[in-house]
Image: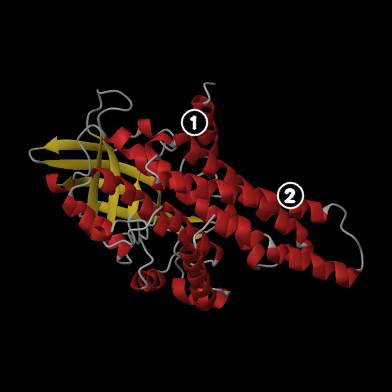
Amino acid sequence: MFTAEQLDFAAAVERFCADSCATIEQRAQLTQGLSNSPELLQRLAELGWLGVSIPTQYGGGGAGMVEECIFLEETARGQAPIHAYGTGLTAAQTYLRHGTESQKKEVVGNLCAGHFEAIALSEPGAGSDLGAVRTRAVRDGDRFVVNGQKTWITAAHLADHLLVLTRTDPNAGKHRGLTLLYLATSTPGLDIKAIETMDGHTVNDVFFTDVVVPPTTWSAGSGDAWHRLMRGLNVERLIIAAMSLGARADRCKTPSLTCAARTVRQADWQFPGRPSSVGGSGAEIECCRAYVYQVAAQIDAGLEDWLAREGSIAKLKCTEVAKLAALEGMQLMAAMVHRRVWKESQVRKALAPPIYGGANEIQREIIGKSLGL
């Protein structure tokens, strides 16, 4: 399924993670209480691995989504605390398709250079239904003035810029009159407040109070953001799938098996059904891997605009299998789960991906509609 060069790349990323962030102590030192490590992201940028799928003229590696998924899977498997990189990569898809040259060089180049970028879509009352956004951007001469609130915004506290979905025409209909704007997180009137979750400080509320946005930071045609945004969201689902494949599904197999085998040897009793249970999870994971890279290869072949259903299937299946694998692994470890060890943290981390990037209920609707249901 992979070329020799791709396998070498995967092995190199795996070795890097094993050396840099394999232990709890290493990750704690890297994150300093945050859920992501700017230091580790910088080191990966120096190796030329960030934005491996981004064109070289914007600082990327000039490869494809297959290589990007390899990077995402291997860094997730290696527990590299950089998962907000995926959010920046999602934002980059919109800039690459619809942004100006200066925006691509500034924001996409910034991501490839080892800095965080973020995208602000969800609001209170407008999560999976982005057509219900109410954050207003009112035209004032040659600028917009933004007021409103975004919520569950990943890495806004670390990002240099925000890509923000706003409503510029309240009378144009649910999916019309929407405009994407981008602005620096240091812009006056922008207030970022942490939302504490089971995964620490990862997401935020973002408040806009008379935030002035000049015309040079309009990221897409005024009032026509909906269809422009869909490209980034389709790729985002593949990004989430690849990360779930590495971080949740693949890493949930071996430690669970080792612990179960040790317990069998020590207690000298049998676990009916456990080998078949773990074998079933392993089969699901391998099917997920094959599908993720099939979709990535189709994107690289130029079929991206026809892959909305496939992206939804990848996201739905990988996140659900990852969650089940984490819970199954926790069950296999028996009483050990009452301690704050690796497995319980994997379970906590496995609960959010089925929700973000469009809740899996929405993915099921997308898949159903694509089948004519």
Sooner in the amino-acid sequence: mark 1 or mark 2? 2
For the point 35% across and 40% down, the residue is: 231
The percent coordinates of residue 236 (x first, y second) are: 42, 46
The percent coordinates of residue 321 (x first, y second) are: 63, 48
Q: Quadrant of the C terminus?
A: top right
User: Disc 2 on helix, strand or loop?
Assistant: helix
Residue 97, visible in the rendered structure: yes
Quarter where residue 122 is shown: top left
Left or right of 162? Residue 103 is: left
The percent coordinates of residue 64 (x first, y second) are: 39, 54
The percent coordinates of residue 53 (x first, y second) are: 36, 56
- Give the residue type at disc 2: Gly
Residue 185, visible in the rendered structure: no
For the point 56% across and 59% down, the residue is: 247
Say few, some or many: other residues with alpha carbon within 10 Å of mark 1 (under 14 / 14 to 19 / 20 or more): some
Q: Which residue is mark 2?
A: 280
- In the image, residue 259 above or below residue 88: below
Q: Nearer the viewer, residue 210 or 97?
A: 97
- Give the residue type at disc 1: Ile
Left or right of 82? Residue 58 is: left
Quarter where residue 339 is shown: bottom right
User: Disc 1 on helix, strand or loop?
Assistant: helix
Q: Which residue is mark 1?
A: 366
Say few, some or many: other residues with alpha carbon within 10 Å of mark 2 (under 14 / 14 to 19 / 20 or more): few
Q: Quadrant of the N terminus?
A: bottom right
Quarter where residue 253 is shown: bottom right
